[in-house]
Amino acid sequence: MNYNIRGENVEVTGAIKNYIEKKVSKLERYFDTPPTSDVNVNLSVYNEEQRIEITIPMTNLLLRAEEKNTDLYAAIDLVVDKLERQIRKYKTKINRRTRQKGAPKHVFAEMETNSVDQAEDGDDSLEIVRTKRFNLKPMDSEEAVLQMDMLGHSFFVFTNAESGDTNVVYRRHDGKYGLIEPN
């Protein structure tokens, strides 16, 4: 993995960098071959609060976690634990889905860059303050819901692998999921 560690209001020392690389590299045990993706780490300090955000974009998965703590090293440990839970959850869902379809046991293989980013809306003044462009990946609605949950977003835009149409899955107020398909 290639590490890109940036600090905002904090100097990224060699000790901090080594600690982050040591902790994040433990995630490689969940992959058959070590991922070749970039690991983007943003550190920031505001009013005695240490914040760390780690994003690992891969082909079929975007791992992202953020934690805040008064101790930077504790925040690093917490964010790595969160990423580990995301990987285990994703692996379990993929294996369960393939078993249900009668396919041979799925191997959680290497996933590389080019992950899907999500567009974010601006404020209520109808002024567009941010535009994001991303590639739509062909997938089924179950995988799209999984990706949406991994990103922590309330909606996810994707290309339906069966129909080839652009679809949107979203989280409803009752906690269930909805699917928007064109006519």
Image (tube, helix red, strand yellow):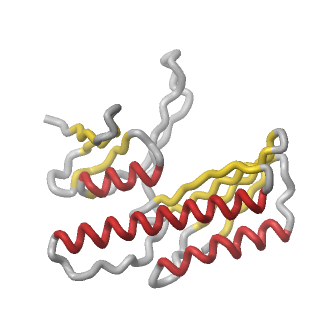
- Between residues 60 and 151, which one lies in front from this camera angle? 151
Q: Is residue 166 above or below residue 147?
A: above
Split into 4 quadrants, where in the image is the N terminus?
Answer: bottom right
Q: Position of residue 17 (x, y in %)?
A: 78, 68
Q: Is residue 76 above or below residue 47?
A: below
Q: Residue at x 36, y 44 (%)?
A: 156
Q: Position of residue 44 (x, y in %)?
A: 76, 48
Q: Is residue 85 above or below residue 146?
A: below
Q: Position of residue 53 (x, y in %)?
A: 65, 53
Q: Is residue 168 visible?
A: no
The answer to whether 158 appears left or right of 86 in the picture is: left
- Give the farthest residue toward the top: 125
Residue 171 location, quadrant: top left
Split into 4 quadrants, where in the image is the C terminus?
Answer: top left
Q: Residue at x 59, y 64 (%)?
A: 81
Q: Position of residue 57 (x, y in %)?
A: 51, 61
The number of numbered badges drawn on the structure is 0
Residue 138 location, quadrant: bottom left
Q: Is residue 164 visible?
A: yes
- Between residues 111 and 127, which one lies in front from this camera angle? 111
Q: Residue at x 39, y 49 (%)?
A: 148
Q: Residue at x 40, y 78 (%)?
A: 109
Q: Is residue 73 above or below residue 42?
A: below
- Between residues 50 and 159, which one lies in front from this camera angle? 50
